[in-house]
Amino acid sequence: MKGILTAGGLSRRMGQKKAWLEWGGQPMILHLHRLLTAVCEDVVVVANDPDDERRLRESGLRTVRDVYAGQGPLAGLHAGLSAGFPALREEEAVCLVGCDLPFLRGEVLQDLERELMLDAKVQAAVPRLSDKIHPVCAVYRADVREIAAALLQNEENRMRRFLEAVRTKYVEATEWERHAPSPFANVNTPDDYREACILWKKEGF
């Protein structure tokens, strides 16, 4: 499995870039990159801001830019597949992960990869809890690249629309959610970040 890590968008609700929030003594994006490298053969970061690119490369990370800029996570998935891993065979797997998931565990991605590989027809394995889905913490086959491109060309960039266009397997997240904190808990606002930091220290991560 290969890994695609998105450096985040404008982070309007946070008021600053989520990728560079401190987490355990390092930027959050480096924390997530280290997690991905433990379970992926190779990892690429999708970053569109020149300053972000410079800082990431200075840290030894490989970066690519969106082909369809400003179109969110779907553009990130497409960039990772088209520029980051262009030689992947159609059946190979990639995980797509946002930079704002501080409690994500590698086993979640490994479980999703196994679910994807159980059926050769499935193109996406996406966690779901009740009616909430997590497409930016999911595993995809490389053959979704052209489907993503076709949608993005028409500025149809909603992840739900994309998941309707590919053969998606929704994986119930109940088992992963039993172990607090939730691996899908993200930080979108300053309050989210403060609460996550308190939980991080409390749980001894």
Image (cartoon, rainbow, N blue to C red):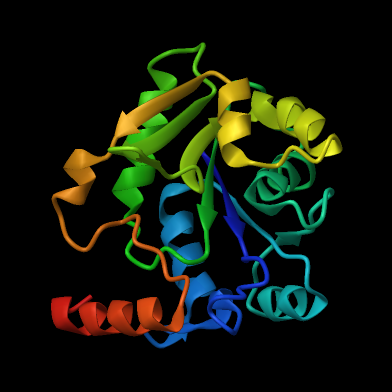
Give the image quarter of residue 159. Answer: top right
The residue sitting at 64% across, 41% down in the picture is: 158
Where is the C terminus found, in terms of image quarters?
bottom left
Is residue 8 visible in this depiction of the protein? yes
Decide: is 39 above or below 205. above
Toward the viewer: 146 or 189?
189
Is residue 141 visible in this depiction of the protein? no
For the image, the number of numbered tags is: 0
Decide: is 51 above or below 173. below
Provide residue 168's location: percent of width, then percent of height: 49, 23
Provide residue 32's location: percent of width, then percent of height: 46, 65
Toward the viewer: 199 or 54?
199
Provide residue 96's location: percent of width, then percent of height: 54, 47
Toward the viewer: 112 or 154?
154
The residue sitting at 62% across, 75% down in the picture is: 12
Give the image quarter of residue 102. Answer: bottom left
The residue sitting at 67% across, 24% down in the picture is: 143
The residue sitting at 56% across, 81% down in the picture is: 20
Provide residue 193's location: percent of width, then percent of height: 39, 80
Is 103 on the left or on the right of 65, as rendered? left
Give the image quarter of residue 17. Answer: bottom right
